[in-house]
Amino acid sequence: MDPKEFLMIPGPTPVPDEVLQALAKHPLGHRTKEFSKIFMQATNSLKQLASCQDEAFILTSSGTGAMEAAIANTLSPGESVLSLICGVFGERWAKIAEAYGMKVERVKVDPGQPILLEELRKRLLADKDRQIKAVTLTHNETSTGVLNDLQELVLAIREHGALCIVDAITSFGSIPINFTAWGVDVLIAGSQKALMLPPGLGVIFMSQRAMAAQEKSKSPKFYFDLAKYRKSLEQETTPYTPNVSLIAALKVSLDMINQEGIANIGTRHDRMKRALRAGLIGMGLKPFVAESHASPTITSVLPPSSISVDQIRRMMKERYQIRLADGQEELKSKIFRIGHMGYVFERDILMTLATLEVSLTALGHRCPSGIGVGSAITELTNVGGFVNK
Amino acid sequence: MDPKEFLMIPGPTPVPDEVLQALAKHPLGHRTKEFSKIFMQATNSLKQLASCQDEAFILTSSGTGAMEAAIANTLSPGESVLSLICGVFGERWAKIAEAYGMKVERVKVDPGQPILLEELRKRLLADKDRQIKAVTLTHNETSTGVLNDLQELVLAIREHGALCIVDAITSFGSIPINFTAWGVDVLIAGSQKALMLPPGLGVIFMSQRAMAAQEKSKSPKFYFDLAKYRKSLEQETTPYTPNVSLIAALKVSLDMINQEGIANIGTRHDRMKRALRAGLIGMGLKPFVAESHASPTITSVLPPSSISVDQIRRMMKERYQIRLADGQEELKSKIFRIGHMGYVFERDILMTLATLEVSLTALGHRCPSGIGVGSAITELTNVGGFVNK
């Protein structure tokens, strides 16, 4: 007998039993009043979670589908897009926009670095005749574990006037976001992250400005045509058969999220990040990202020089059934990534540090026994005790 | 206490407990060997079920997403498409192709009628310089309950040389299809029909000719770009996070389908259609579609003149928790539709007839008591006893 597999990866993330039980219920007909009620509750609850006073649409697709919806609905072929890139998922925006025939300019930083506000300002200032129609960016870069300062980046984009299109797939539901007050135009989320569900739903929030752009956009679209979703929403339904089971489960997970409150959830994730980083540093490991812009939901780590990422991931999986993620693309085998978003708590961070210490020691790493967990406990004590909520 | 809701609608359809239990399992990481194994088993099992020797891709979307994938991957803006339309879903192909900038010619029949082979032949013969690049059609038209003769239609299209793009959403898994031998190029299925799952997965089968067209297609695409799916499939994975839970459940439902065998399943559906139609006619109701092209998975019925569709559907739901579907668009309130596909058996047909008779009688319809079930039993006896498999 082995312990239950535990996903400390950046998605899919652990799913609460209440949510799994909702998934095990027989699907409702999608054109019934019963489903419409759940669907509208979930939609309104998502808007509340994003502090969004405009539109929210639930798509039956993964997050990438929602990203494509963002581009195809707000832009037309030939228009200019500025893509702020600090990793694989920032680059994905640029690739989608290129696939749809937009002119894409990339502003890149090295992996592990955040998007630079000054670079953005400089580029926008140079665009005197307002050619840039939209700026794409990533709130929390999944491939590196960098959290960008969304509020200040959006502020700079609003001064210019371009649409601000944000991937919040690994931040939404774990980090408070104020969609309307900050002035975000399009924001994307996915079910399998802090929303604590299996993959299969994307969420797209649209400001009034974004909906106005939607009406003018000439990009081809059908399944992701948000005009149809808006029209259907007036009848409390969706244009095409939605994943009714995942939406019913989403209602359950959103109730759990609302019960804790997004401010408390934000604090919980911040504490997990601090404890984990303190423990890793205590064991002599080096986090890949500096404290100042480290993500509260994903921590990337450089392995000790004599031990490979593959060895660490394999031992964590085989001995403890804990899944850690490899780096992606150019960071493959160079870092490992620990996901801690959604249904994850301090006790999981302490468990991860303890099992990682045993694994590293078995692989030849040397550190004082218990130093990982010890350092995390000290950090948690410093930031104010062990309250989970 | 009420009985469990029973979905006699054309999808979502009843889901077996074994499949619901699979959905209640904790999701696997999508980049694990465990998931890859299940994913490849499901993919290969789908190919076997379609008798497809070429490509099959599982998409995290509803069936309409897979339809869009079919168009965006095989055609380019400005190319000519012939759309054979016998209902709402035939028209959907035309709308998607128009959204992507193709020139669409519609060949329509009245609702309740099948696509006419002679009309198709005539139109294809007239296309001497081979302008028509693709013909779209619907195998089983969900909005009316018409089954088209796919094999003979495909044969005519193959003689011309156009790509043959088929919506088999409400036939696949309940009616045997021989994808490769019949010469189909693109075929679409959805999870919430005879595959006995909740909505959320689309399936697309592609012939070698269709894959060659894919390489040349200039339509914009990203989430549904099948070149990426093919490349990922070589690594036994998907390009974007798939709905791992639904794919694991699909493996379970495909195992159940394989155990019964598609030939037996086809016979079961044919028997259900015959029994249901005999019972309806026995009660003095008129099936909307003639016997010769009636669907084995969906039966549309005209209500008695003094009773509305809404009254019948409401009483069946309130008294018996059995859901029937209304007509769609121009057929709304004119017909009601009984879905009988996937995890549905003769006993469910008999139950539906019995409860429908009570409901109709309560609403003022007159017929000899028990005539619906009696007529069905006679029909079943005539076609060869009560063997389910």
Image (tube, coloured by chain):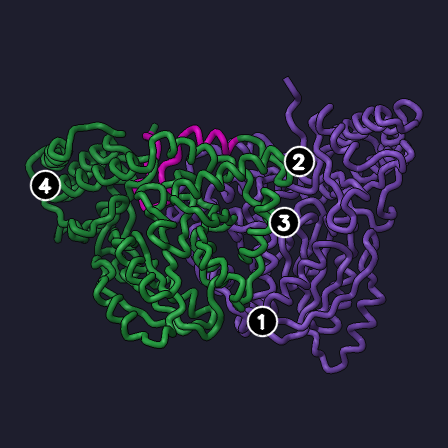
Chain colours: A green, B purple
- In the picture of the structure, the residue carrying the numbered disc 1 is B213
Q: Secondary structure at mark 2?
A: loop
For the stretch drawn in magenta, the main secondary structure is loop
Q: Secondary structure at mark 3?
A: helix
**Residue with the mark numbered 4:** A282
Marks 4/2: CA–CA distance: 57 Å
Q: CA distance from mark 4 to mark 3?
A: 55 Å
Q: Chain of mark 4?
A: A
Q: CA distance from mark 2 to mark 3?
A: 16 Å
**Drawn side of residue A157 relative to residue A293, left or right:** right
Residue type at numbered disc 2: Tyr
> On what subunit does the disc labeled 3 rest?
B
Is A52 included in the stretch rendered in magenta?
A: no
Q: Answer with the quarter of the image where residue B114 lies.
A: bottom right
Q: Mark 4, mark 1: which one is toward the viewer?
A: 4
Q: Quadrant of the C terminus of chain A?
A: top left
Which residue bears the numbered disc 2? B343
Respond whether the residues carrying marks 2 and 3 are from the same subunit: yes
Specify the farthest residue to the top: B1
The amino acid type, in three-letter code, at marker 1 is Ala
Image side of residue B206 versus residue B331, left or right = left
Q: Nearer the viewer, residue B215 or A253?
A: A253
Contact check, label 2 and label 3, Cβ < 8 Å: no
Q: Chain of mark 1?
A: B
Instruction: Report how far apart the C-alphas of labels 2 and 1 lie in the structure.
Output: 36 Å
Q: Which residue is mark 3?
A: B49
